Amino acid sequence: ARHANPSSRVGTILMSAQSFWGWAPWFITEDGWSSMKDKILVFDGVCVLCNRWVQFVLRHDEHHQYKFAAMQSGPGRAMLLEHGIDPDDPISFLLLDGDNGYTNTDALIRVLNSFRGRWRWMAAILRLTPRFIRDPLYRWFARNRYRLFGRHDRCLVPPSDLSDRFLS
């Protein structure tokens, strides 16, 4: 498992949040080190399309390698800020994989590639599409997601059998 240095910017942000608000996300241990063997998807918790994406990932994630954080949560906001994404107006979901962060179609391709069968083929097709074509199209959908797909009044609560996969 990779460990993030607590002196990194994200470590500083999260440790500051812990001392200020008195909470610590599940991935911050007592010594301040982050055990990030799981991949984390930071998503818009009130977006209907984004919630469907999370449900899709949950269905296809046979190895339970993904954890989820709504951008409206403390850990989700901190992770978005660390990667230069405005949590109040995100243009992409964020995939954290160890010390690396991925957005736009790069994140989408990495997630799809971790599944079996046709989803790997879909990832391969997307990867063959030039980024200068696929990313603007992705960002157009991201900017218009509420108008096209709707939004919830508040973040949806995960079922109790899946609550250990969601950061809050």
Image (cartoon, helix red, strand yellow):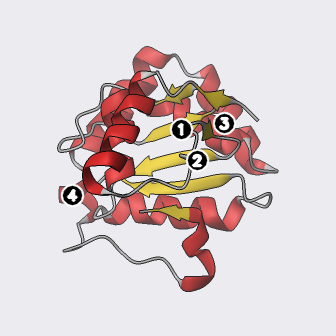
The residue that appears at 32% across and 53% down in the rendered structure is: 74
Q: Quadrant of the N terminus?
A: top right
* Residue at mark 3: 123
Q: CA distance from mark 3 to mark 4?
A: 25 Å
- Check disc 2 and give the amino acid type: Thr
Q: Where 61 sits versus 95, above or below?
A: below
Q: CA distance from mark 2 to mark 4?
A: 36 Å
Viewer-nearest of labels 3 and 2? 2
* Residue at mark 1: 32
Q: Quadrant of the C terminus?
A: bottom left
Q: Is residue 167 left or right of residue 39?
A: left
Q: Residues within 10 Å of mark 4 (few under 14, many from 20)?
A: some
- Check disc 3 and give the amino acid type: Ala
The residue that appears at 36% across and 49% down in the rendered structure is: 18
Task: From the viewer's side, name the closer residue of 90 and 164.
Answer: 164
> Can residue 92 be seen by looking at this rendering?
no
The first of marks 3 and 4 along the sequence is: 3
* Residue at mark 4: 146
Return the x and y of residue 65 as percentages of the image width and height. 71, 52
Q: Is residue 148 left or right of residue 126?
A: left
In which image quadrant can residue 138 be found?
A: top left
The first of marks 3 and 1 along the sequence is: 1
Q: CA distance from mark 3 to mark 1?
A: 35 Å
- Check disc 1 and give the amino acid type: Gly
Viewer-nearest of labels 3 and 1? 1
